[in-house]
Image (tube, rainbow, N blue to C red):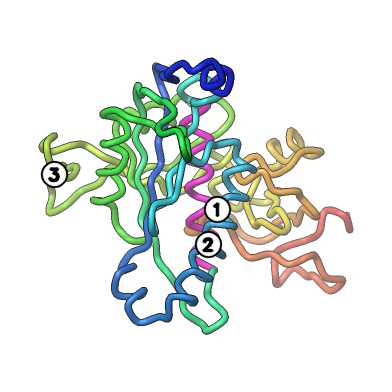
Amino acid sequence: QAIRKLQRGQTVVEKYNIVTVFFADIVGYTGAAGSMRPAQVMKMLNELYTELDKLAEKHQVYKVETVGNQYMVVAGAPLRVPGRVGAQRVALFALDAMNFVSKYQTKEGDKILIRAGMASGPTVAGVVGQAMPRYCFFGETVDFASKMEVTSKKMKVQVSEMTYRLLLDCVNLKFIMTKRMEGGIAGVEIKGKGQQITYWIEKASPCEKCFELATGSFALVPCGHIMCADCNEKYKMLPCPTCRCKVDDRVEWRGKPTKIVDESIEVEHAPNNLDEEVGLTSETML
């Protein structure tokens, strides 16, 4: 539709009632870039953004742009989807991005840290420029999402209260989110908005029971996400509902019930000598 308007010489401006916007950037980027050769910086950013682009495609979010070390995606536009669907897609993308960055390092052994922020609400989008036209987003929601990122913390995803409420309404996934507290005060000071109640996204699973390992739970290979017996049966022939990865194997937990601290656990393809001491048994061996 935007292309057709441009071909007719019309201005492309579109309004969206509800989208979720995500920003991320590299913590300490200026210092890190200053200690690296330009070619090393470009190589690092290319590797990082190439992987994030793959995650964006997997989670069906729209990559808007990269500016320097800042990365931006949205859901709910240009393809319109219900607010909670867009919020869920961006949240799962954000968790997947954090998981990738936590394990990423350059060939020189350097690691990076990112911080991220999300906000939901109405936006306006349009094509800017003629020589190199870009589809850009404008409005208070975009500004708020950027401020969510700026005031976030390393390896954390901070979300606005609107995004928090949309995620609570998600049907097929449950999100663990904690209210941000600083010195006993809820929220964070946002320039131009005052004190705002915000939340940290910790993890996501298909249901409450999937947040703990219990007899009959399954760890998915290779992603390591956990599913209870009921959800494992429900999604038996489908990709992981949390990260949308192809499931190569499902490893059953035979140990004691335990809470999952990390979003996923490390599980290799089930070997032939799994025993009760490990507590995991490959479903393909049952």
Badge nearest the viewer, 3 or 2: 2
- Residue drawn at 70 percent across, 36 percent down: 230
Magenta stretch in the rendered image: 85-103
> Which residue is the site of mark 1?
52
Residue 127 is at least partly visible in this image? yes
Tell me if 68 is positioned left or right of 221 in this view: left
Look at the numbered discs 1 and 2 and tell me whether their residues touch, using CB distance below 8 Å.
yes
SS state under label 1: helix
Marks 3 and 2, Cα distance to the nearest angstrom?
30 Å
**Residue 200 screen position, x and y as percent:** 34, 46
**Residue 250 screen position, x and y as percent:** 77, 53
**Residue 247 screen position, x and y as percent:** 76, 50
The amino acid type of the residue labelled 2 equals: Leu
- Residue drawn at 49 percent across, 26 percent down: 77
For label 1, the crowd category at 10 Å Cα-Cα, with few meaning under 14, some 14 to 19 and many 20 or more, is many
> Which circle's residue, 3 or 1, is located before the other in the chain?
1
Q: Is residue 145 above or below residue 14?
A: below
Marks 1 and 2, Cα distance to the nearest angstrom?
6 Å
189 or 218: nearer the eye?
A: 189
Magenta-span inclusion, residue 93: yes
- Residue drawn at 74 percent across, 33 percent down: 234
* Magenta stretch: dominant secondary structure: helix
The amino acid type of the residue labelled 1 equals: Leu
Badge nearest the viewer, 3 or 1: 1
> Which residue is the site of mark 3?
189
149 or 236: nearer the eye?
A: 149
Look at the numbered discs 3 and 2 and tell me whether their residues touch, using CB distance below 8 Å.
no
Q: Is residue 14 above or below residue 67?
A: above
Q: Which mark is residue 48?
A: 2
